[in-house]
Amino acid sequence: FGPCGIFAGLLLAQMGFKPIILERGTEVRQRTKDTWGLWRKSVLNPESNVQFGEGGAGTFSDGKLYSQIKDPKFLGRKVLHEFVKAGAPEEILYVSKPHIGTFRLTGMVENMREQIRELGGEVRFQERVSDVLIEDGQLVGVQLASGETLHSRHVVLALGHSARDTFRMLHSRGVFMEAKP
């Protein structure tokens, strides 16, 4: 779950749901070590790197936030307020080009994860969804690479752009997808 995934999990937990968050990669501190290992020593962990792991690719974008000028419902404000509650500087609420920074983002992601757990949610690392379970055209759960099955009629996939194997699986199962505009 990237920043979008952890934020979605946090919103669900705040609404009283008990989300089970499945993160393909490792927790953010280990992921940071793995990413630096790739950049400094050319050692790639295929499941824990810039693309995969807690915090998503945004964790290594140096914490730049983009304008919400085309956000007529001001939904982006909710994100910024949650970031401040998780440890971002309050100035991101009013500066024109807000910036958090990668090192501060790491702690924020951990804080958001802990809040999800405090609200009754669950976070699992190194768990890859290998299949979606569909019966009579309806989603009924997910199959994990470990062999475990989780039954649910509601699944939020915050894949980012690099989970090509997951996109292929979804396509093969007939799940409708379209590119962002």
Image (cartoon, rainbow, N blue to C red):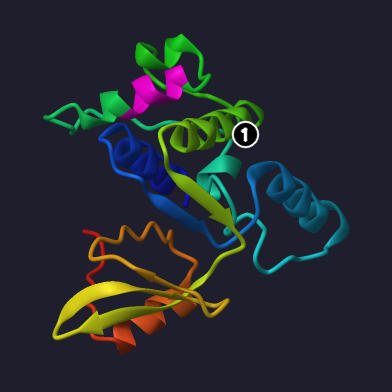
Q: Quadrant of the C terminus?
A: bottom left
Q: Nearer the viewer, residue 36 or 113?
A: 113
Q: Is residue 28 visible?
A: yes
Q: Residue at x 20, y 84 (%)?
A: 135
Q: Residue furthest bottom?
A: 172
Q: Is residue 140 left or right of residue 110?
A: left
Mark 1, residue position: 106
Q: Residue at x 67, y 59 (%)?
A: 48
Location of residue 173 by image quarter? bottom left
Q: Is residue 176 visible?
A: no
Q: Nearer the viewer, residue 91 or 10?
A: 10
Q: Nearer the viewer, residue 56 or 40?
A: 56
Q: Nearer the viewer, residue 134 or 44?
A: 134
Residue 115 belongs to magenta span:
no
Secondary structure mostly seen in magenta is helix
Residue 88, percent across and down?
Answer: 51, 19
Location of residue 69 by image quarter? top left
Kind of residue at disc 1 = Thr
Does dot 1 land on a helix, a strand or a loop?
helix
Q: Residue at x 38, y 44 (%)?
A: 9
Residue 115, percent across and down?
Answer: 47, 30
Extent of the magenta region: 79-85
